[in-house]
Amino acid sequence: MASKINWGIIGTGAIARAFASHLKLSETGQLAAVGSRNRQTAEHFARQFDLQKAHPSYQDLIDDPGVQAVYISTPHPMHAQWAIRCAEAGKHILCEKPIALNQYDAMAIIEAARENDVFMMEAFMYRCHPQTLKLIELLHQNIIGEVRLVCATFSFNAGFHPENRLLNQALGGGGILDVGCYCASMARLVAGAAQGMNASAEPIEVKGQALIGSVTRVDEVAVAAALFPGGILAQLATGVLCNQDNCVRIYGSEGHIHIPNPWVPTRDGGTSHIILCRDDEPLREIPVESPGPIYAIEADTVAACLDNRQAIFPAMTWDDTLGNMRMLDAWRAHPSPAWAAPQGALR
Ligand SMILES: NC(=O)c1ccc[n+]([C@@H]2O[C@H](COP(=O)([O-])OP(=O)(O)OC[C@H]3O[C@@H](n4cnc5c(N)ncnc54)[C@H](OP(=O)(O)O)[C@@H]3O)[C@@H](O)[C@H]2O)c1
């Protein structure tokens, strides 16, 4: 077997830890080094994950000749800067979602990857999971007839901590960018697959509304309605101050599909289920086996597509990333300035 890819991680937060622990179980990758803004934080992380190298800056990590691929796990506003620096240093890139704050920054990252001939993928891990492949297979079979409506929700209550990245405008706070991006990506995937495509579809129109916090000035809870070609509607809901039922339901002319765990179908491997409710049949649970931990599958997807320089659908291709950012731009443009929660109303 070819030698394993040496990964470096930029940032030492919550998702960096999850990725580092799963990477140990990947078939194709191993963690070689970490970079932090702070030497002690890097050293602490390196001790925890048994790493030889702890870099006291992100640039040092990027310049490390022993690192082939970099996983970027900073808050969203820093993704573009570090992804472009990685590309310029000839390092392959797996960058956390959303890849950037808007479509234009995403274009700059993709251009840097193209110019420097490196791999680049936006880290929507659910797109690498076999459950998503199974969903596409069902839609290609028209199993619920003509798809009319996709309802996708990803929303949680992080508690009112305005300094935290989830509510801090300077750190890209708000539900739409943090987890609404999953809902947009799922609606686009379903609208494409429902029309037999092996790619996401792009909406004709997106209308949004949001509760903008009077203290935070970010979208604390948000919804969107979108219309796709072929007459498919999408209804999206997200938020960082409101627990909701995080699922996807797809309604068609002959039944509906319910995905109880669309975003993290299985964290550590095992079986997940898609529920099929055809109008003329008893409800059916379709099991999907996962080969391993979700972030290990993601790292192995990178390895499998490395020579292609971008992922293969349903993992995030460059066009998919650009389309998703365009949809998020449209969603975020809409929330009318009309409603800002009165002081304290959304705590
Ligand atoms: N795919 C997934 O399942 C998933 C899940 C959660 C989050 N995410 C994404 O991953 C990214 C990070 O999320 P997280 O939850 O891991 O965040 P987090 O726990 O706050 O960690 C972010 C890390 O980024 C670094 N950082 C650089 N500049 C920073 C700044 N100005 N303020 C705070 N931290 C800064 C810090 O590492 P150093 O101090 O070491 O430099 C920090 O530990 C986000 O873009 C998020 O959307 C993805």
Image (spheres, rainbow, N blue to C red):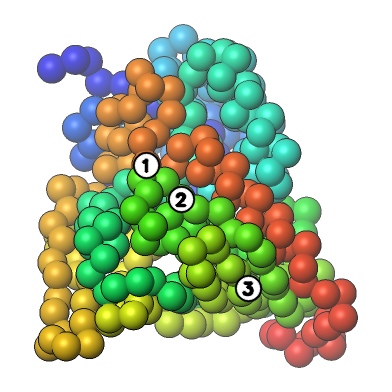
Cα distance between the residues tagged 3 and 1: 24 Å
Q: Give the x, y percent position of residue 135.
A: 27, 61
Q: Is residue 302 above or below residue 152?
A: above
Q: Residues within 10 Å of mark 1 (few under 14, many from 20)?
A: some
Q: Quadrant of residue 283?
A: bottom left
- For label 3, the residue is 224
Under circle 1, the secondary element is loop
Cα distance between the residues tagged 1 and 2: 8 Å
Which amino acid type is marked by label 2? Answer: Ser
Quarter of the image for the N terminus: give it: top left
Q: Nearer the viewer, residue 168 or 192?
A: 192
Q: Give the x, y percent position of residue 166.
A: 64, 63
Q: Quadrant of residue 286?
A: bottom left
Find residue 200 and name its label.
Answer: 2
- Left or right for 66, reference 270: right
- Left or right for 248, reference 238: left
- Left or right for 47, reference 129: right
Residue drawn at point x = 51 percent, y = 44 percent: 320
- For label 1, the residue is 313
Query: Are dots 1 and 2 in contact, CB under 8 Å?
Result: yes
Q: Is residue 88 above or below residue 235?
A: above
Which amino acid type is marked by label 3? Answer: Ala
Residue drawn at point x = 37 percent, y = 61 percent: 194
Residue drawn at point x = 60 percent, y = 14 percent: 115
Q: Is residue 259 above or below residue 92?
A: below
Q: Give the x, y percent position of residue 198.
A: 36, 45
